[in-house]
Amino acid sequence: MSASDSLDPIAEVETVHALLSTWLGTDAEPDVLERFAATQHATFSMVTMQGTRVSSSELLSGLRRARNSAPGLDIEISEAEVLLNEGNVTVVRFMERHHRDGKHADRWSTAVLTTEGNPPRYSWRVLQETAAPTD
């Protein structure tokens, strides 16, 4: 049994996105961003829907300035599925629906998580976002 067997990767995705929507959508306390930042590995990187590669430090720098920049934002996670759970590596694909001002924007995201520490916890390594067709 691997360390990741005792963790729930879908709950991890939901928790991290709840932190993100709280940070971007409310006048959140600084600890919300600190808890979000603590989920990322030092080598974390993502590719945005626009195709831009962003490092952890670049993402966090932008987020520091973006507190409450999208008032009322809610991020809904659905269609989450674990694509790989082997050793300390878990790959999860999920739909993100960003709700705000009566509108929504969808994106498919794929995340690579590793487990580390004792007790084990997830560490986000890679996130790839792809725009989903609008309905």
Image (cartoon, rainbow, N blue to C red):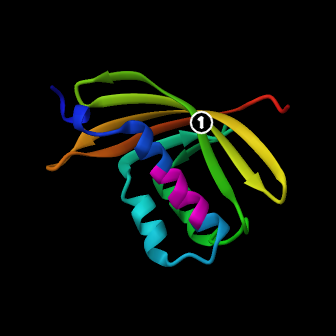
Q: Which residue is mark 1?
A: 78
Q: Residue at x 63, y 46 (%)?
A: 76
Q: Is residue 65 visible?
A: yes
Q: Is residue 84 left or right of residue 111?
A: left
Q: Is residue 67 left or right of residue 131?
A: left
- Figure disc tally: 1
Q: Find residue 97 and report its horizontal and vertical position in percent.
A: 69, 43
> Which corner quadrant holds the C terminus?
top right
Mark 1: few, some, or many residues within 10 Å (few <14, many ≥20)?
some
Q: Find residue 122 and report its horizontal and vertical position in percent.
A: 32, 44
Span colored in magenta: 15-22
Q: Find residue 15 and report its horizontal and vertical position in percent.
A: 46, 52
Q: Is residue 50 visible?
A: no
Residue closer to the observer: 127 or 103? 103
Residue 110, compared with residue 71, is above or below; it is: above
* Amino acid type at mark 1: Ser
Q: Find residue 90 and report its horizontal and vertical position in percent.
A: 35, 29
Q: Residue at x 48, y 76 (%)?
A: 30
Q: Residue at x 73, y 65 (%)?
A: 70
- Indicate the secondary structure of the residue bearing disc 1: strand
Q: Is residue 116 left or right of residue 113?
A: left
Rendered image quadrant of residue 77: top right
Rendered image quadrant of residue 10: top left
Per the image, is 46 magenta? no
**Dominant secondary structure, magenta:** helix
